[in-house]
Image (tube, helix red, strand yellow):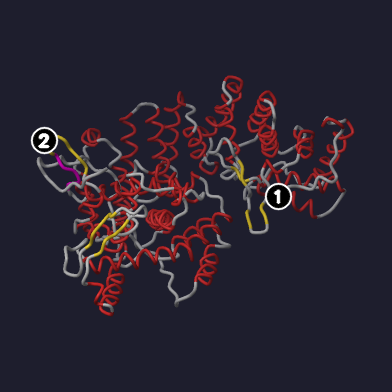
Amino acid sequence: MSGVSSSLLSVTDAGEVSNGFSDRWLAALRDLEASKVFRASPTQDEDRLPSLWLRLRAARDNGGSADVVELASLLSQVASFSPRADDWSAPYEPMLTMVEGRTAIPSDLTDVQIEVLVVVSDALPDHLLRARVYDVLAIRSLTGADRARWYQAEMGAVIEATLGGERWMRDRDMWDRALLVGRRGGKPMAASLQKLTQILIDHALTADLAEFPGPVADLLDKHGLARDRAGALAARMRNLASSAELEPARSYRERAARWHGVAGNSDEVSVDRLAVVNSLIAEAEGLSLGPDSDSHPRSAYLYERAMKALRMIPRKQREKLGVSALTTELGRRIRAAGAATLGTMGVLESESVDLSEARDHSVAAVSGKPALEALRAFVDLSSFSSLQDERDRAEKILAEHPLQTLFSNVHFASDGRVVHRSGGQGGEPIYGEDPATWRQMIQAYEIKVSLMVQGMLAPAWMALSNEHRLMLGDFVAIMRGSSIIPSDRELLIAQALYYGYDGDFLTSAQLLAPQIENMVRLHLRNAGQQTSTIDRGVEQEIGLTALMGRESVSEIFGEDIAFEIRALFCGPIGPNLRNNFAHGLVSDDSVRSVHAIYCWWFVLRLAFVPFWNRLHDARTADSHEPAERDRPSAREGETGSEPGP
């Protein structure tokens, strides 16, 4: 699928473009323009480059002169490149990757095709396509001088493109790329970067809500620009919040808070964040006053988001604003609402099938859907493991084979080290379970994880990632919309999940494992429990294994999620991801291990469920207090820490 036939293309000796060659392809471009492929003003319901790609493909398939067909095919491939705005070295990837091939990327284009792009670039009537072509020519340039020239031309084309009245939410990747080019270009690009920045500032300060001034301001914030206009941008975002609908209004107040922070006005930051808190509380109170008893979980979810926003306001500012006691009140309301566990989604169940059937079923479940629906189907391929079901199965097996319960077991690591000796039936309990029963539960759990990853998650992930190119920003949006994710870990966890979606599961798991520990510690603190010890004036955090040994963990997270965390991250019986990653015990063989893939899916499901519930006003939502609370001081001499980091 990649590449364009170059049988009709030719250049003169030494690769120089002749006048005849230029005239030939400029004539082909004029003929292409005459077919109305390039629209002077894109309609409100279309993305410019994706729609242009479709029209160019249609022009290619409709026939015409050989040169027109060839040029339409070449330009359609350039329009099809899928942008990776956050990747400087490889900013484009194939739009589609399938078994029989993939669509093109810049490196697929031949030298002759590059010469054709050189000829037609300045004459292309669509500014964004012209900017894309200039970017490709810069990427393929052999000298720094040529590269700088094409990048300068790209900046000029984006500056000429209009922002107002367009559906630019997908095409904004071109503005994102241009800002990155301008920042990386140094002094030669300074004037163009300043001009483009001013255009974006003007749009953010003057455009109405239908023209996306908020996302434009987000681009400026992302690239560290417009710092001298931070106060004006903050005021504008706050003003837009007053006329926006409920949820968008909160987003604009959050933007106002960020820009007030850039301006160094901490008092106004707290005012904006408190406005978000009050909005969430007011909506929750409105639901609780209604006749529908099913509104209580939704109210709790809104209270949890309010808690998350409130914890971002420093204690001194809360006292200054007269809301220092609001954290306690919100905690009381959460408990009163009775939302005690994560909301669950539908469970995929079937008769026993071989892996090939499970593979086909999982691929079909995520295929042919919009990106968000496909991601929902992916996290819904299975529910979390049921502690009661795992215990019942283990006890049944042990009842059928009683001899294996009588003896202790020695557990070895992959390098031959003895890492644990577990007792037989009646020995010291492990997380409240008989050691023989727990051992059987973990053995069955690891088999289940292996079959689930190989038969469902891995093939479904491949189908999902081939069909949809999710960016880092998409995962950031999910984290910001998920009440279980701590407000100070949204970008970090989003980056980890993005690595996994991109196929780097080992890096993803290594980042996620300590964040699970932080999440457990956070919710224990929010429940009023001590998570650190002080011995002779030195405060130390209690490790994950010791924290998960507390009975209250099952009350806070629910027994099923608590079991998954214990089985996957804690203790030498099982994957023990927390310990293995913390002590550097993973090797190259773990790059695509089933445990790393499952760890990624587990955290993705934890975060995505409350995000999805928020979007669809679901009647169930997670109950955990997601934001950092003020840490009580540890009691002198308290014990319970576990050794090691």
Q: Secondary structure beneath disc 1? A: loop
Q: Residue 400 shows which numbered tag? A: none
| Quadrant of the frame with the C terminus | top left
- Confirm whether residue 246 shows in the render: no
Report the label total.
Answer: 2
Name the image quarter holding residue 137.
top right
- Confirm whether residue 107 shows in the render: yes
Which tag is nearer the camera, tag 2 or tag 1? 2
Residue 27 spot, x, y in % from top left: 86, 39
Q: Amino acid at mark 2?
A: Arg
Q: Answer few, some or many: residues within 10 Å of disc 2's Cα (few below 14, many 20 plus, some between 14 and 19).
A: few
In this view, which residue lies farthest toward the right?
20
Q: Residue at position x 18%, y 43% from top?
A: 532
Which residue is tagged 2?
Answer: 536
Q: Is residue 365 above or below residue 607?
A: below
Q: Amino acid at mark 1?
A: Ser
Residue 181 spot, x, y in % from top left: 59, 30
Q: Answer few, some or many: residues within 10 Å of disc 1's Cα (few below 14, many 20 plus, some between 14 and 19).
A: some
Name the image quarter holding residue 192.
top right
Q: Is residue 362 above or below residue 66?
A: below
Which residue is tagged 1?
Answer: 2
